[in-house]
Image: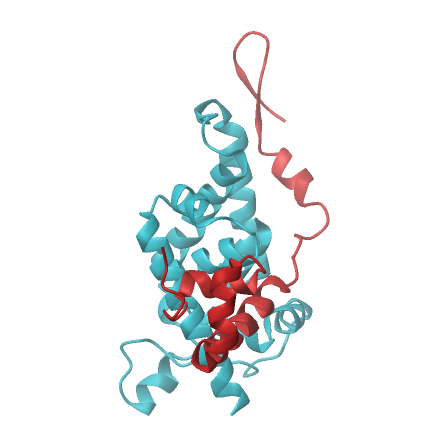
Chain colours: A cyan, B red
Amino acid sequence: MFSLLYRMVRDRALAEDLAQETFIKVLNGIKSYRPEFKFSSWIFKIANNAAIDHLRRKSIDTLSLDGAPSAETPEQMRATSLQLGDRTESPLDEVQNRELGTAIERAIARLRPEYRSCILLRHVEGYSYEEIADTLELPLGTVKTYIHRARNELRGYLEDRRE
Amino acid sequence: MTDISMHLSTDEIELWAQGLLPAARALHLADCSLCRVEADRERKVILELVQLPRFAPAAGFADRVMAQVKIATPSGDWEQR
């Protein structure tokens, strides 16, 4: 669950805060857990909601390595892109850059948050399409579409890198 | 029933990448260079994803969480741990 949060928000300290918020909600709200729902799915659902809420609140999803999706000119892209290495790196930044700096991690970061949750649940957590649909409360067809699109986008990013 | 000459769907390519593609469809894959190229590209991405490392929070995380959890007392009240 921490891995999912960390890859969603790409900030260790923030991922810990969201994980803490998730566990507190789980433990304090245990009475509202419905046993017909897989327990781990319930936790992932709360964690994913926390991450998506945070991304929406802070509009971090518009901050990609290439700048905001709305950026049309190179100047706009530069102004809205993440500036890596433009400040003194703290030990925590160093750890994050090492952990999330590989090509595949950077490609995942470029996906829309909804695609990111689906692809991580499918291929990192090993969830079935049906479990993802239950966890994220999405129609099965939407989950399949998101995962297929996410893999296509990842292929594109990774192949661009190799060329 | 799927026509053996039909190209593999995305779902079937995922099954193949997991070693779960039915033999009849694997026959098509063996004969179809288009599907093989597509399947290979897909498998590379899936392999990269499944090999991603798991991360853990910093030491002391569990204690920090439990410090904020309310425990029910026998009287039915809540008590902060």
Where does the image place residue B1, in percent across and percent down from the top left?
Answer: 36, 55
Where does the image place residue B27, in percent across and percent down from the top left?
Answer: 51, 68
Q: Residue A58 or B57: which is nearer the viewer? A: B57
Q: Outermost residue toward the right?
A: B59
Where does the image place residue A145, in percent across and percent down from the top left?
Answer: 34, 60
Q: Residue A6 or A34: which is nearer the viewer? A: A34
Q: How many numbered dots are placed on residues in this image?
A: 0
Direction from residue A30 to residue A77 in the image, left or right: left
Direction from residue A137 to residue A97 in the image, left or right: right
Q: Outermost residue toward the top?
A: B75
Where does the image place residue A94, in percent across and percent down from the top left?
Answer: 66, 73
The answer to whether residue A18 is above or below residue A78 is above
Is any atom of residue B17 visible in this view? yes
Residue at image point 39% right, 72% down: A63
Residue at image point 45% right, 56% down: A117
The quadrant in which residue B71 appears is top right
The answer to whether residue A78 is above or below residue A128 is below
Is any atom of residue A14 visible in this view? no
Residue at image point 51% right, 49% down: A127
The quadrant in which residue A110 appears is bottom left
Direction from residue B24 to residue B79 in the image, left or right: right
Residue at image point 39% right, 46% down: A133
